[in-house]
Amino acid sequence: MTPSAIPLTDAELDRLEELLDDPALEEALRLDEAQGYLCAALAGPRPMPPERWLSDILGSDEALEQPVGLEAAGLLRRFADALEADLNAGEPPTLLLYPLEEGDDAPSDYQPWCEAYLAAVDSAEEDWFDFLGEDDSEENAENSEEDYEEIAYLDERLFPLMVLTGEAESAAREHGEPWPEGEEREQMLADCEDDLPQAVADIYNFWRAKRSIGTVHRDAPKVGRNDECPCGSGKKYKFCCGDESGD
């Protein structure tokens, strides 16, 4: 492990948390959100450049012109280096989560962490799913089944995040699909909480392997799954004309 990848001490994490909560950085993410955002920013077809994720986490480019922003940026760079070193080693991250309410026995609040992760996915320079299916020329038609399997795998590993943010339930109800209730729903949430760290590590290493292979890029623009559907419905493309469920 290089010196830059040495994990922050508890005191340094406390300092980073304090800096992100400083009034001078009023648009900054919380510490839990910063970790979630970074886990996705370091993954994907192309890792997000540090200057980009620093701006997003601190709330603006101007934040780096302030002493508090510069100090936070230095800690965030080290935090990201250590996080990436763990992910490269195949180690699931230890999630930094806030409690849902006050009290020693209060359950952890997974939603902000997962929402920040998915925000980074949406902010990626290249749409994750479009990237997997972008080479659809005739000479590569034999790869379509492999593309489908990769998309299905990524969907499956993102499922815990979609459940814990409520997006999966909202999409199911919008499409008239059944969704677990009562104890079954609570068990699903608990299972997704347990699976989340490993899912994050799996997604990171999936993209790491894809980047090592390399992919031919399409020149023509495509509609991203999270873009507004061109049909004018106002819905995201993946929930409208890009929905392959047939509903």
Image (cartoon, rainbow, N blue to C red):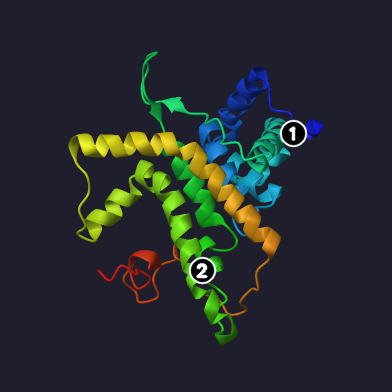
At x 37%, y 14%, the residue is: 103
Q: Quadrant of the C terminus?
A: bottom left
Q: Is residue 177 left or right of residue 50?
A: left
Q: Compare residues 25 and 147 and report the one nearer the observer.
A: 147
Q: Secondary structure at mark 2?
A: helix
Q: Position of residue 219 (x, y in %)?
A: 62, 79
Mark in the foreground, 1 or 2: 2
Q: Secondary structure at mark 1?
A: helix
Q: State the CA–CA distance, disc 1 to disc 2.
A: 34 Å
At x 69%, y 52%, the residue is: 49
Please tell me whether residue 175 is drawn above or below residue 222 in the rendered image: above
Q: Position of residue 156 (x, y in %)?
A: 42, 53
At x 33%, y 37%, the residue is: 189
Does the residue at mark 1 contact the one at mark 2 (Cβ under 8 Å)?
A: no
Residue 67: assigned label = none
Residue bearing mark 2: 147
Q: Compare residues 145 and 44 and report the one nearer the observer.
A: 145
Residue 5: assigned label = 1
**Is residue 64 visible from the viewing direction of this image?**
yes
Q: Is residue 49 left or right of residue 199?
A: right
Q: Is residue 139 left or right of residue 185?
A: right
Q: Position of residue 225 (x, y in %)?
A: 44, 65
Please tell me whether residue 168 is drawn above or below residue 225 in the rendered image: above
Q: Position of residue 96 (x, y in %)?
A: 52, 29
